[in-house]
Amino acid sequence: MEAKQSSESSVAVNEGEGNKTAAREYNDAQRRFVESGQVEKKAREAEQALDGPEGPALRDAEAIGKSHAAEEDPALGLVAQKQKIRERAYELWEREGRPEGRHDDHWHQAVKDLQDK
């Protein structure tokens, strides 16, 4: 079993908690966009879109997005709960010396620990 992904390989590798490769690529893309000098231009375009015929639909979409706070959207509450489980499972994994093949054990123990709280 291959533990790491080489830059030449197209085989996806589980990177554990989070996807460091995707995060790095996202951060690099954001940095390139800022360095391109297009931020002000795109901000003006967005402002014009708000003032144009798309404005009401964009404001509605913004309101919907803002209403999706964890206390208003049960699905986001589940996301937060899964994050707590993930963090607890990671703590258990680290405490046990990072053993391989125990993901399910740590996950189930984390669920139990959080339910017992």
Image (cartoon, rainbow, N blue to C red):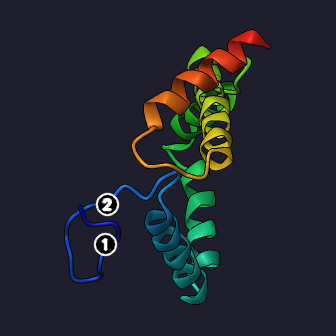
Find out whether the residues at labels 1 and 2 contact each other: C-beta distance under 8 Å. yes
Q: For mark 1, does the 10 Å Cα neighbourhood hold few (<14), some (14 to 19), or many (20 or more) residues?
A: few
Q: Which residue is depicted at the point 45% across and 38% down?
A: 102
**Looking at the picture, which amino acid does disc 1 mark?**
Gln
Q: Does residue 52 lie above or below 103 as drawn?
A: below
Q: Quadrant of the C terminus?
A: top right
Q: Position of residue 60 (x, y in %)?
A: 58, 30
| Left or right of 101, for residue 8 | left
Which residue appears farthest toward the right when viewing the image? 117
Q: Does residue 94 lie above or below 61 as drawn?
A: below
Residue at label 1?
5
> What secondary structure is marked by label 1?
loop
Q: Position of residue 72 (x, y in %)?
A: 69, 17
Residue at label 2?
13
Q: Position of residue 110 (x, y in %)?
A: 62, 26
Q: Which sits earlier in the primary sequence, circle 1 or circle 2?
A: 1
How many numbered marks does the figure carry? 2
User: As rendered, which of 71 and 11 lies closer to the eye?
Assistant: 11
User: As rendered, which of 29 and 83 lies closer to the eye?
Assistant: 83
Q: For mark 2, does the 10 Å Cα neighbourhood hold few (<14), some (14 to 19), or many (20 or more) residues?
A: few
Q: Which residue is depicted at the point 20% across and 65% down?
A: 11
Q: Does residue 46 lie above or below 42 as drawn?
A: above
| Left or right of 80, for residue 22 | left
C-alpha span from label 1 to label 2? 6 Å
